[in-house]
Amino acid sequence: MTDAYAGRRVLVTGGLGFIGSNLARALVDAGARVVLVDSLVPEYGGNRANVAGIEDRVTVDVSDVRDPHSFRSLVQEQDVLFNLAGQTSHLDSMTDPATDLEINAAAQLSILEACRHHNPTVKLVFASTRQIYGRPQYLPVDERHPVAPTDVNGINKAAGEAYHMLYGQVHALPVVALRLTNTYGPGMRVRDARQTFLGIWIRSVLTGEPFEIWGDGMQRRDLLYVDDAVRAFLLAGARDAAVGEVFNVGSPVSVSLAELAETLVRVAGQGAFRIVPFPPERQAIDIGDFYADDAKIRAALGWSASVPLEDGLRRTLDYYREHGDRYW
Ligand SMILES: NC(=O)c1ccc[n+]([C@@H]2O[C@H](COP(=O)([O-])OP(=O)(O)OC[C@H]3O[C@@H](n4cnc5c(N)ncnc54)[C@H](O)[C@@H]3O)[C@@H](O)[C@H]2O)c1
């Protein structure tokens, strides 16, 4: 894997965000020449603290992927483009659907147009999401499951993914899409529940506030530690077998939200939670249980999740105990 990126020119959109910055660390360690593009909109997960310690080894370009002119020059001469810039809040996509459409769909077309015209051989890995499946019709969810999102964010992410796959088929761009499940770890947004409910849980545990589980606590989820997500991106960007494919990046090992909350409190050695009814606006877009069938990515790329939940939670808590003041 290290060889695959040594000396390569790599662009990461959303590179100051949670997953993008963890990917950036792995890339610089592998010897890549890394450019990070991020708009640093305060409501999203971008945070300069995410690249603390590697600032001198990456180039940061604070710009917006909705601006096709700046992106055109950025994409030229890159070998790999990890496309992670996105609006991630499901609720925000319902209150401000136009912004979600601009970033998660329209800007994706601009990015693909820039690649088609100015760098058609760049390897392009898109961060898609399990949200596009909507409420699962069966479990675990494989890649053949119907795409039926329950919110505007899911529809726009599905469009963003579909544009990537279309440009692969019609214009021969070497594209891959990774449908990530709930990802957590150092660098995640913990200020609120915009990125994931687990962010606000972690902050609450560490600041001594009780946190809330919405619903009955029985909903099941597969949780993905960020290092495992990063490994999936690196494999997808390096392996020819990935080109033209969409892969679930998750796990058939699931946990109920109540079990997850109990595990978090036990690992932290502190904290409390209560189970409360769903807020109506969240209930309306909730997807129920989700866990992924990851057989396809196991077979094609040899990837599987390797970090046990307790280890991942411990590493995450350790990180915020030390660096929380830059994230609260
Ligand atoms: N974290 C998860 O559980 C999860 C699950 C499924 C999919 N994803 C996808 O992975 C990607 C990264 O998510 P994340 O969890 O790291 O979230 P994040 O919010 O930390 O990262 C996204 C980054 O994109 C940046 N960004 C947003 N709009 C931009 C724009 N117009 N121009 C430039 N930069 C912009 C943000 O500032 C942020 O730094 C997203 O596309 C998201 O949809 C994440």
Image (spheres, rainbow, N blue to C red):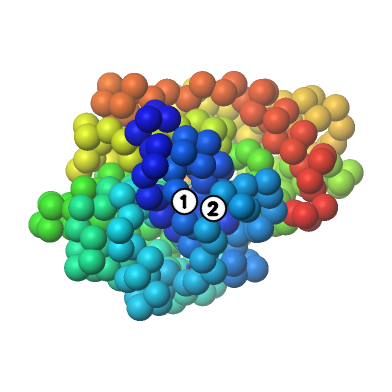
Residue 81 on image: x %, y %: 35, 52
The local secondary structure at tag 1 comes to strand
Q: Is residue 123 toward the left or the right of residue 215 in the image?
A: left
| Marking on residue 299 | none
Upstream in the sequence, badge 1 or badge 2?
1
Q: CA distance from mark 1 to mark 2?
A: 5 Å
Viewer-side residue, 15 vs 317: 15
Determine the residue positioned at 40% across, 37% down.
Answer: 6
Q: Is residue 200 above or below residue 254?
A: below
Viewer-side residue, 6 vs 107: 6
Let me know if residue 301 appears in the view: yes
Ligand 1 within 8 angstroms of badge 2 C-beta: no
Q: Quadrant of the N terminus?
A: top left
Question: Mark 1 sits on what residue?
Answer: 34
Dot 1 amino acid type: Val
Residue 149 on image: x %, y %: 37, 54
The residue lying furthest to the left in this view is 170
Ligand 1 within 8 angstroms of badge 1 C-beta: no
Dot 2 amino acid type: Val
Residue 220 on image: x %, y %: 54, 32
Determine the residue positioned at 77% across, 42% down.
Answer: 320
Q: Pointer 1 and pointer 2: residues touching (CB < 8 Å)? A: yes
How many numbered circles does the render carry?
A: 2
Question: Mark 2 sits on what residue?
Answer: 58
Q: Is residue 137 above or below residue 42?
A: above
Label 1 neighbourhood size at 10 Å, few (<14), some (14-19), many (20+)? many
Determine the residue positioned at 38% across, 25% down.
Answer: 303
Q: Is residue 186 toward the left or the right of residue 227 in the image?
A: right
Residue 281 on image: x %, y %: 58, 62
The local secondary structure at tag 2 comes to strand
Q: Is residue 240 above or below residue 307?
A: below
